[in-house]
Image (spheres, grey):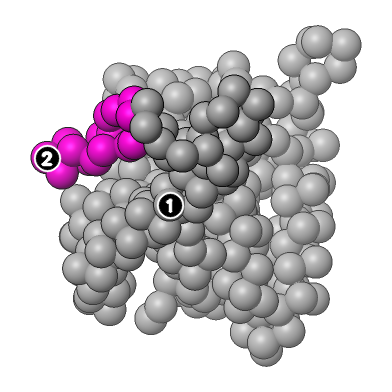
């Protein structure tokens, strides 16, 4: 199945956030965390909006789905990085369907940033040590997308599995969402075009190709195809934009040099084919323009 759409068979795990220090919400510069009861209510509200969005996406009502995903992200506490990464990835999927490539890139990047933040704030992912408060697992056969489970709700869940197994599962979930976000950002960058975007898409595809075991066969084929096609497109876009830039600089330079009886024709830019760089030669005999 394409990574452009939210999947129907993802198993959900909310990473433990019991003692994380990385909190975005603040009042007068002071860190703010919700009480378990407040967090549970917010997560329930976010999850309800997300499930409605998933249903709208499945029925191809992409703008309505996007609006609901926005509600979901606004309700989800900022320190719950994994659920937010999932929602941002789904927002990117909506923008792909709406062919809004700029917003696709932004949402996918936000998903990746949330995952990076989680990896930095959860000590288990750095040292393998167990933090206070344990991750719980909730699996439902009718899951539509990654489930959001609050801290309060997780207390009522079955006993947790071994910590090392929890960490492995968490790492696998992070890698799975990272691949989805990278696939969607690469798609957005490829469609948006331009030197910067195409070069970024190539880097995203390289990152994906480095973890082939994390990709579906269909996604791996897409990545391999893009890695064949993107390099010449990047080079062509670079040369085009460099040419346009030199044209603008030449016009600007002629305006500055004209009062002195000079023009850019007095200055020849010579490209070094080995390095791709340029050197400047001054020719006094050039004609002013």
Which span of residues is magenta-colored?
268-283
The secondary structure type at the circle numbered 1 is helix
Residue at the extreme left? 274
Residue drawn at the location 52% of the way across and 38% of the way down: 288
Residue 93: image x %, image y %?
57, 69
Residue 160: image x %, image y %?
42, 42
Disc 1 crowd rating (10 Å Cα; few below 14, some 14-19, many 20+) is: few
Q: Which residue is mark 1?
A: 243
Residue at the extreme top? 29
Residue 267 in sight in this render: no
Residue 276 in the magenta stretch? The answer is yes
Residue drawn at the location 80% of the way across and 66% of the way down: 67
Q: Is residue 172 left or right of residue 271?
A: right
Quarter occupied by residue 142: bottom right
Residue closest to the eye, 278 or 15: 278
- Image vertical order of residue 87 relative to residue 155, above or below: below
Residue drawn at the location 48% of the way across and 63% of the way down: 193
Residue at the extreme right? 28
Alpha carbon separation for disc pair 2 and 1: 18 Å
Q: Which residue is mark 2?
A: 274
């Amino acid at each position: 199945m394409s990574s452009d759409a939210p999947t129907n068979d993802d198993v959900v795990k909310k990473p433990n956030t019991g003692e994380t220090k990385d909190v975005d919400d603040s009042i007068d510069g002071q860190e703010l965390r919700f009480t378990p009861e407040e967090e549970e209510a917010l997560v329930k509200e976010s999850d309800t909006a997300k499930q409605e969005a998933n249903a709208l996406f499945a029925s191809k009502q992409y703008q309505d789905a996007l609006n609901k995903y926005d509600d979901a992200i606004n309700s989800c506490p900022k320190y719950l990085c994994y659920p937010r990464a999932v929602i941002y990835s789904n927002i990117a999927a909506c923008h792909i369907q709406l062919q809004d490539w700029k917003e696709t890139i932004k949402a996918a990047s936000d998903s990746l940033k949330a995952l990076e933040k989680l990896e930095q704030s959860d000590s288990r992912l750095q040292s393998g040590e167990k933090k206070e408060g344990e991750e719980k697992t909730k699996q439902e056969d009718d899951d539509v997308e990654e489930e959001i489970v609050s801290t309060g709700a997780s207390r009522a869940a079955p006993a947790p599995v071994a910590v090392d197994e929890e960490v492995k599962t968490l790492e696998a979930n992070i890698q799975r969402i990272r691949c989805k976000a990278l696939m969607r950002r690469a798609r957005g960058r490829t469609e948006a075009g331009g030197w910067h975007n195409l070069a970024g898409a190539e880097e995203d595809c390289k990152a994906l190709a480095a973890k082939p075991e994390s990709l579906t066969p269909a996604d791996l084929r897409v990545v391999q195809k893009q890695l064949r096609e993107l390099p010449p497109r990047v080079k062509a876009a670079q040369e085009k934009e460099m040419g346009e830039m030199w044209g603008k600089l030449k016009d600007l330079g002629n305006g500055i040099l004209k009062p002195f009886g000079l023009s850019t024709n007095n200055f020849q830019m010579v490209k070094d084919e080995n390095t791709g760089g340029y050197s400047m030669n001054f020719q006094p005999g050039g004609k002013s323009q």
